[in-house]
Image (cartoon, grey):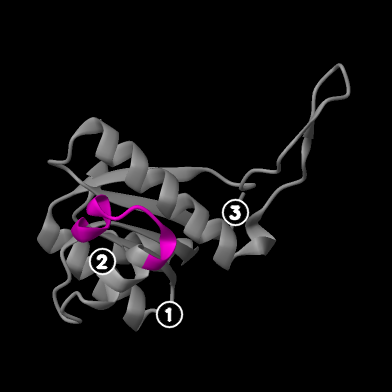
Amino acid sequence: MFDTKVAILVLNDLEVWQKLNVTAFLATGIAGSAPEAMGEPYVDAAGSRYSALLGQPIMILAADRPTLLRARRQAQERDLICAAYVEAMFSTGHDTANREAFLSEPAEEPALVGIALRGPKKEVDKAAKGARLHP
């Protein structure tokens, strides 16, 4: 049904609150980078309006750090939309500090705790190889 796929890979040994936080932030990265992926706003039976959501399913996958790094490299090579979250961002309190923490990471091996990918299905599947559906 969809030509594209969205996958969020989260480090498998994080605390539950961290996994949820990383997943939420990464989903906003995809939404912000791919406005064409957004559906229409929702309206309930009483006429109350709600925000639009991504118009396609999001696969949430568990991965170890080597798999995250490999998926990031693959995403860059395949020109996929990629959002990333590094461990140091857990200790910041706002967007500017998050970007500073991200910038200070080593370019080749950042301490990734999650990445989100969007692009053609086959390319996302290849990039996410080694990750498994989150339990």
Can residue 7 be spotted in the picture?
A: yes
Classify mark 2: helix, strand or loop: helix
Point out the residue furthest to the top here: 46
Residue under numbered circle 2 = 71
Q: Nearer the viewer, residue 92 or 67?
A: 92
The kind of residue tagged 2 is Ala
| Residue 135 percent across, percent down from the top left | 25, 30
x 47%, y 63%: residue: 118
**First of labels 1, 2 by sequence position:** 2
| Other-residue count near label 2 (Cα within 10 Å), few / some / many at <14 / 14–19 / ≥20 | many
Q: Nearer the viewer, residue 84 or 98?
A: 98
Q: Quadrant of residue 50?
A: top right
Q: Distance of mark 3 from mark 2, alpha carbons?
A: 21 Å
Q: Is residue 77 above or below residue 126?
A: below
Classify mark 1: helix, strand or loop: loop
**Which of labels 3 and 1 is toward the front?**
1
**First of labels 3, 2 by sequence position:** 3
Classify mark 3: helix, strand or loop: loop
x 20%, y 59%: residue: 88
| Other-residue count near label 1 (Cα within 10 Å), few / some / many at <14 / 14–19 / ≥20 | few
Secondary structure that dominates the magenta span: helix
x 58%, y 62%: residue: 32
The kind of residue tagged 1 is Asp
Residue under numbered circle 3 = 2
| Residue 131 percent across, percent down from the top left | 22, 51
The kind of residue tagged 3 is Phe
Q: Which mark is residue 79?
A: 1
Q: Which residues are magenta?
A: 87-96
Q: Quadrant of residue 116?
A: bottom left
